[in-house]
Image (cartoon, grey):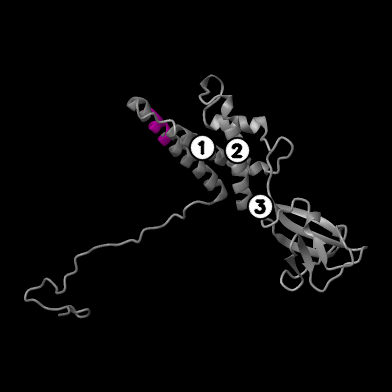
Amino acid sequence: MVAPTADLELVRQRLRDTGANSTFGTDVDPALDTAIQRAVEEYGSDRPREVVVDLTGNATSFYDVTALTGWVNDASRVLRVEYPASAVGANYTPEFLDPIADWQIHRDTTKYYLYLIGITPAVTETIRVWFTAQHTLSTATDTIPTKDKRAVLDLAASYACLMLATEAAQSVDMDVPSEATNFREASDRLLSIAKAWRAQYDGHMSQGPEVSTKAAVAIRDWDMTPKTSPPTVWLTHRGRR
């Protein structure tokens, strides 16, 4: 899977690695593509893609999930099941099955199934299934919503910086101390930039470490006895011995 050239270029722009300012060269493109795909995978976990598929009844209670185009075993989740389903119209009222009593995901030694408990839809009936699927960003398919695209590429820039920082750290030549120092500095700068781009993504997705509020405290001197002459005591909250 290869990301579109335009998206690779947008990640390069975030790294300020374009045109005459290019430092990494074209050989870094595979790493940038890997960074984009890792970002898409993480984004898919944070905000899964929702897909709807209509299944035709087969007079049984079991439906092979391979009929759910986009389903990924051990990753996808069924969200809702509508039965019986039909074309949506002005007076249409959907009927959803109970996710506890009416359906569950079942499996045998080789396959996963949508199991309709005690229900056997006829071949003339339709089961409408909502489920989660992975996002894709390639030259053929782009399922990332426009409103989230910038954040996904921000995250890709973070992953790219982490990979480039690793490469810089491994380039240290202990026989040339001055160059070794430069490599370490480059690695540290890239790690810092990676955190900054990660923060951009987390901010967009409303994620990241929770902001904690420190407990407030105030310190005051409290006179246990009034400053009077002759000495006396307060009417309430008298001093304790």
Residue at position x 69%, y 59% in the image: 77
Q: Is residue 18 above or below residue 230?
A: above
As drawn, the residue found furthest toward the right would be 124
Residue sitting at the far left:
230
By secondary structure, the bulk of the magenta-drawn segment is best described as helix
Q: What residue does disc 1 label?
A: 163
Which quadrant of the figure has residue 18?
Answer: top right
Q: Nearer the viewer, mark 3 or mark 1?
A: 1
Q: Is residue 9 left or right of residue 235?
A: right
Q: Residues within 10 Å of mark 3 (few under 14, many from 20)?
A: some
Quadrant location of the N terminus in the rendered image: top right
Q: Which residues are magenta?
A: 182-188
Say which element carries label 3: loop
The residue nearer to you, when weighing 163 against 199, is: 163
Q: Secondary structure at mark 1?
A: helix
Marks 3/1: CA–CA distance: 25 Å
The crowding category of the residue bearing disc 2, from other C-alpha atoms within 10 Å (few below 14, some 14 to 19, many at least 20), is some
User: Which sits earlier in the primary sequence, circle 1 or circle 2?
Assistant: 2
Along the line of sight, the residue nearer the viewer: 95 or 172 = 172
Residue 34, numbered label: 2
